[in-house]
Amino acid sequence: MRLHRLELEGFGPFRERQVVDFDAFADDGIFLIAGRTGAGKSSVLDGVCFALYGGVPRYDGMHKRLRSDHCEPHEPTSVSVEFTAAGRRWRVTRSPEYERPKQRGEGLTTEPHRAELHEFVDGHWQGRAARPVDVADELDEILGLSQQQFLQVILLAQNRFAEFLLARNDDRQRVLRRLFGTRTYEQYQESLEQRRRAAEREVDEALATVGMLLDEAEVVGGDLVADGDASAGDIVARLAAIEVLAQRAAYRAETLVRERDAADAAHRAADERHRALAKVREQQEQRSISRAALARLEAEAESVAADRVLLERAIAAEALRATIEDAERDRAAARAAEEAVEEARAEWCSVGGSGDDAIDALRAQVEQLTGGLAVWAAAREEERRLATLDQQLAADRAAVEELTSAAAQIDDRRAAVPALLETLDVELANAREAAGALPAAEERRADLAARRSAASEAQRLAEQLTAAEAQYLHDSASHDRARAHVTDLLRRRLAGHAGELAAALVDGEPCAVCGSTAHPDPARGDAEPVTDEAIAAAESVRDAAAAAEKTSAAAAAAARSAHVDAVARAGGATTAELDVLLAEADAALAAAREACAVRDRTAQQRAEVVAADTAAAQERTTVSARLEELRTAVDVGSAERARVRAEVEAARGDFATVAERIEHETIRRDAAVRLADRIASASASAAVAAQAETDRDARVAASDFDHHSAATSALRDAAERARIDDRVRAHESALQTERARLRDLELALAGEQDELLDLAPATAALAAARDAWAAAVDSAAHAAQRSARLADLAERARTAHTAVAGPAGDLDVIVRLADTVAGRAPNTHRMTLESFVLAAELEEIVAAANVRLEEMSAGRYRLQHSDARAARGAASGLGLEIMDAHTGQARPAQSLSGGETFLASLSLALGLAEVVTGRAGGVRLDTLFIDEGFGALDDETLDVAMRTLDELRQGGRTVGLISHVAAMKEQLPAQLLVEATAEGPSVIHQGAGVAAS
């Protein structure tokens, strides 16, 4: 990465626009940024960091301090950096959040944080991102370095050299973790810890299962436990005891099975005796029942004989049924025919028929009436048509009058149209002019609504900001108290060391400090010594408070940013002010919309008037044509009506209508037809009835009956005959069956008394035998179940106990591995996996740093990595020491002088830069900055340091140094001078004359 150009405006101490051309120093390769204290030398590097990452380390949480205090409210603040990375040239421009005057109205509004990214392509700058979040995402890919890495390898800021060298192991671990991204190894450690806990749970659950099985087995076999059996012990002893209980249970089950079989045999014998006696008793009861049934059947014999005779006569009469029924049916039909003739004759006389009812005379009258009806039917149709002609003629005459009136009305309406159109044209022009203000009113209404919403949001966010800042102050105070507590504990611990040493002194034994065997006045410690655990707990509380303070600081910054953004979107106005403006805008918008509605209604009304006039003209033409047609139809209809009326009056005769005459004559004709038909039918029915009676009397005479009435009385229907037959047959069958059953029972009970046997003794013996057998079955079943249950529990417990061996062995391996990776025993160095990986990285950093430190210290000093165990639970394996070649002893870095510390820190920083660069994917560093620290070096050491830095120029690299040392001003002709003006703001001078001045 190479920086080309930096532009600062309204940033830090720079009010006016300042430009730094880093390419101008490319030939020299190393240049000096000089100026008086407070002029703003470090602000040049702050500008680079802010443009690339949106933040400056020394202003963390105070972004508002980035804007120059010398700026007027209307003057802008921005930083722009041009650089090349991976062969592509980029320009990033960024401005912090600051207050500026409102564009409309009075007061200030917040200008939000802005950022833009451009790429130089084919001689032109092309935009790539225009929002801070998008610019950050793009730069993350382009730079390949986080802000922390950038500050460690490119911009070595003031007072940051010695941080890494003198840091505690835990702090050094946090820095390395961010630089090398070793969070994955910590996740490995957490994963193994989770596996350890899961394995422990699995083994504990398996052992708990075995214990539950053994507990259940001991409960099941409770009464089988002998006095000498052990009631407690380890799992193996309990398993053996349960297997003994299972054997005892099996033996008891076998004994009870034998007892059950004996009881079963006794029960079967008692049951057989009881069944034999019960069978004799049952036969005795059936014999008594059979005797009674036979006596009842013999008493019913006389009644059954009468039914048999009745059935025989019914069967004989059944052969005459058809002849008798035919004669009765035919005679009934003849009587019905005579009655129908009388009804028809009365009807014929009622309609004016003559007394002559001969069939020939009746048929002649029917023919005469039929001919007249045919003539009158045609006249009836004309009569119906006459009514239609009258209606049509009246309708046509009414339509002529209606159309004449409608034509006059149409002419009156059309006469008023021209004046109405003239009035509507004037109203439409006025409405169109008023409706033209609608777009502007809608735009202003939408803008005010958005600002009102933003103002409401700003009001809500202001409350959140107040709460967030209060939380930040609370967490900051808690952090301060926690740090003070840790400091107090450390002070008390140091003060108590003498007391601890004194407590370990023994008379006659040498002191570990002075070697004396006499201890005349040993020190006395505090009543309450400070332990490592207390210090570790206090440090944990302090770290938690620091994390909480950082979180609340971030939350407060986020709330502040959100509030400022909302205030900016609201234009700085309050909700009350915007409510007034919004009400005015609503009124203006409503008026404009009403004007639009009036315009639309007037235009619609005018269009409707024009359309109505056109339609009226067309209607007037149609009415005129229809009126002419109707007048012609009235004339033709009047002539046709006169002709039809003459024909109808001739056909009516003495009746009111032709239809009435046709109806009357049709009734007379139908009555004559019915009378003639019924006279013929009655004559035929009488002849058929006489023949049927002759046939009936002949067949009855040939039968056993002396008259047809006797045969009729003997008739029965099929259901009754079947019922009588069934009764006779059932009685005969029952009588035979009962006699056979009684004969068999008498033979079976030959020699037995008639008195019923007593079954009570046999029943009691059977019940006793059944109860004994049931009790034996229950006892045997319970014993068998308990035996099977104990055997199953013993087997399951043995199997579960055997299965625990595998997970238990795995648990030992997992626990040892998890403890080792987590830095617990058997890890003697107490190094976690992450610390081990970082220790390897630190070794490589130390090797790279020693290349320069040996040269700058003339071979005296070397950095040395230490993997010694750290005290009080601190991270081990990340220690740094200084090997002093003059003494051959390692010494802590804190023992170095100021100049030596600077050289060691510079070497370590350059070594760290090389290693981090390699880990970042081979990022090329063409520009490097080092801020201060050279004033602590003597002239000779400064020369050595300058030679080392001079080597960094190789390969086209440009190195910028910030220092007050006069010797460096003489050695470095390429300089950038930052000078504070008399008015206050600083300016930057770059050029050939800077060094001379």
Image (cartoon, grey):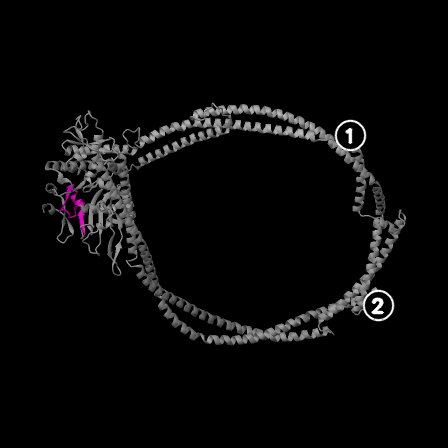
Q: Is residue 966 left or right of residue 876?
A: left
Q: Is any part of residue 49 visible from this angle?
A: yes
Residue 955 against residue 662 in the figure, above or below: above
- Residue in view at x 81 percent, y 45 percent: 721
Outermost front residue: 520
Secondary structure under badge 1? loop
Q: Position of residue 368 (x, y in %)?
A: 78, 68
Residue 98 is a magenta residue: no
Say which quadrant the N terminus sits in.
top left
Q: Which residues are magenta?
A: 17-41
In this view of the protein, which residue sits in the foreground, 146 or 747?
747
Give x and y (percent) for residue 493. 22, 35
Classed neighbour count for the residue bearing mark 2: other residues with Cα under 10 Å, few (<14), some (14–19), many (≥20): few
Mark 1 or 2: in front is 1
Q: Is residue 221 visible?
A: no
Left or right placement of residue 582 versus residue 616 in this view: left
Q: How far is disc 1 from disc 2 in space, using C-alphas?
A: 101 Å
Query: In this figure, which residue is indicated by the disc labeled 2?
Result: 356
The residue closer to the viewer here, 258 or 557, is 258
Q: Amino acid at mark 2?
A: Asp
**Residue type of the residue flagged with mark 1:** Gln
Asked if residue 40 is among those painted magenta in the image, a careful observer would answer yes
Image-quadrant location for residue 76: bottom left
- Which residue is identified by label 1? 753
**Percent from the top left, x then y, of residue 792?**
50, 28
Badge 2 marks a residue whose secondary structure is loop
